[in-house]
Amino acid sequence: MADSHTDVSMKAVINKILAVTGVTAIVGTRVNIPSPTDKTFPHVVVTKLNDSPSHGLGFNKPASVLGRVQVEGHCETYAEALDLMSAIESGLDGATVAMSGWGTVRLEGIGIPVRDYEVGNKTLYMGARRYKFLMAGTNVS
């Protein structure tokens, strides 16, 4: 089965993440969809949240939000999670990616604070940013 436009866009987001020096300095190439089988830390997970285009104000307008993804950073220390999420934000917020069938779209992100979680007896830290794929020139809050 051929990739949907969102699957292609997720690959574009992963490629954009891997192009951010601050991210790769922390995780190397450990960027995965949706979750790594090898739980080596730190790593980034990209998850599709929605791939249905939605409209801004008014249903007669063209779709402005073309999909959403969540980018999570999983780390062994709080400080490393903060650094990773800062690098992701710097590299992705406002960046453009090619989205098959739609052309070039812009990423708009919102952050979720770094929090801790337990795996076995180990405390880990996760930060996340949720991104909208926006048509070029669109401002949607």
Image (cartoon, rainbow, N blue to C red):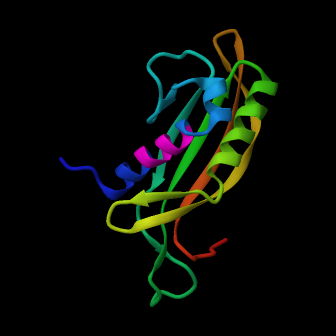
**Residue 120 appears left or right of 3:** right
The residue located at (62%, 73%) in the rendering is 140
Task: Work out which residue is located at the far right of the displayed protein and give it.
Answer: 79
Q: Residue 83 in the image: state x and y as whole percent.
A: 76, 32
Q: Is residue 21 above or below residue 105?
A: above
The residue located at (61%, 39%) in the rendering is 20
The residue located at (52%, 25%) in the rendering is 30
Whether residue 121 appears in magenta in the rendering, the answer is no
User: Which residue is at the front of the view, 36 or 31?
Assistant: 31
- Count of numbered marks: 0
**Residue 139 appears left or right of 105:** right
Res. 74 image quadrant: top right
Boundaries of the magenta span = 11-17
Q: Residue 129 in the image: state x and y as whole percent.
A: 65, 47
Q: Is residue 32 above or below residue 90?
A: above
Q: Quadrant of the C terminus?
A: bottom right
Task: Work out which residue is located at the far left of the displayed protein and give it.
Answer: 1
Res. 17 image quadrant: top right
Whether residue 12 appears in magenta in the rendering, the answer is yes
**Residue 27 appears left or right of 83:** left
Magenta stretch: dominant secondary structure: helix
The residue located at (72%, 46%) in the rendering is 112
Res. 22 image quadrant: top right
User: Which residue is at the front of the view, 10 or 74?
Assistant: 10
Q: Is residue 89 above or below residue 108?
A: above
Q: Residue 12 in the image: state x and y as whole percent.
A: 44, 48
Task: Work out which residue is located at the far top of the displayed protein and give it.
Answer: 121
